């Protein structure tokens, strides 16, 4: 079987297994992110009274792409360790395990994104030509996710305690990715450092498209690609170099 077909089969198997073992089946793909976003809206939108009338769509346009990034990176980073039993039995290129996790989360993200687009239309945000900008934006974010996920997946088997560090760093990153506030709310001196986080232009681009019917800032998305390239190179290099050592490590 070709490795691309192996990835697709792995995604299909994961999705089917997840649906079969849960009482609510595929509905959980919708309920779980909605509950997650509702909690943060209650805390920041109602409790701390952040934002204004448009804070709900503002928050949702940040949380939906963040959940895709966060879930994919966490699972891809731990994918080799999670599949230790299979790795001990047969040879499979180790990047396959990370890609299966990433594309499984991508499918679930697309379901939630469609719901988000429907919500935006319900509250009066009309689709426009600029909404086609979602396609290159998602490709840029997918490239970032693959780069970070494979890099972490190549490193974590050497020191599995890194998983706890990664989990905490991702939690920190969530609060500094512009999900709950915009760059304009920060002091001028802090904005440049804030925008070095590649998820900031990604989140802002979703808002530009869905809330303001504007094309995303292509230059800033180019920066995301440039940041992703060395991480992808490191991940692929390590996965190739230590291909035969991972079964011994885990």
Image: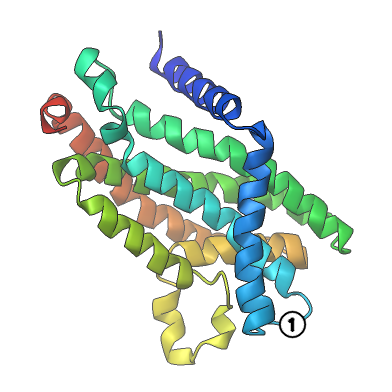
Residue 106 visible in image:
yes
Query: Which residue lies at the image location 22% right of the left edge and 13% below the top edge?
Result: 89
- x then y, percent, for residue 82: 31, 33
Give the residue pinned by disc 1: 52
Say left or right for 65 vs 244: right
Say left or right for 77 vs 197: left
Quarter holding the N terminus is top left
- In this view, 25 is above or below 152: above
Say left or right for 126 vs 242: right
Q: Closer to the camera, 15 or 73?
A: 15
Query: Which residue lies at the image location 37% right of the left edge and 51% below the top edge?
Result: 228
Q: Closer to the camera, 91 or 208?
A: 91
- In this view, 177 is above or below 193: above
Query: Which residue lies at the image location 22% right of the left edge and 33% below the top edge?
Result: 239
Give neighbour class at mark 1: few <14, some 14-19, many 20+ (Cα, 10 Å): few
Say left or right for 15 vs 3: right
Query: Which residue lies at the image location 57% right of the left edge and 86% below the top edge?
Result: 185
User: Residue 47's image quarter?
Assistant: bottom right
């Amino acid at each position: 079987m070709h490795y691309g077909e192996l990835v697709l089969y792995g995604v299909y198997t994961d999705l089917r297994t997840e649906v079969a073992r849960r009482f609510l089946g595929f509905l959980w793909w919708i309920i779980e992110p909605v509950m997650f976003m509702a909690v943060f809206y209650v805390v920041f939108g109602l409790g701390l009274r952040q934002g204004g009338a448009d804070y709900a769509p503002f928050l949702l346009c940040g949380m939906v792409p963040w959940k895709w990034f966060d879930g994919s990176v966490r699972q891809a980073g731990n994918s080799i360790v999670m599949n230790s039993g299979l790795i001990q039995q047969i040879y499979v290129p180790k990047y396959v395990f990370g890609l299966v996790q990433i594309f499984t989360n991508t499918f679930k993200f697309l379901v939630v994104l469609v719901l988000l687009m429907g919500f935006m239309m319900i509250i009066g945000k009309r689709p426009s030509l600029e909404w086609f900008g979602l396609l290159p934006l998602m490709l840029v974010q997918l490239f970032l996710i693959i780069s970070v996920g494979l890099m972490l997946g190549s490193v974590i088997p050497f020191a599995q305690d890194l998983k706890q560090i990664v989990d905490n760093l991702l939690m920190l990153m969530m609060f500094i990715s512009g999900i709950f506030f915009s760059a304009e709310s920060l002091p001028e001196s802090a904005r440049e450092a804030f925008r070095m986080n590649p998820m900031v232009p990604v989140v802002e681009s979703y808002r530009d498209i869905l809330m303001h019917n504007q094309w995303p800032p292509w230059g800033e998305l180019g920066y995301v690609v440039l940041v992703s390239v060395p991480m992808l190179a490191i991940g692929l290099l390590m996965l190739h170099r230590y291909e035969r050592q991972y079964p011994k490590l885990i």
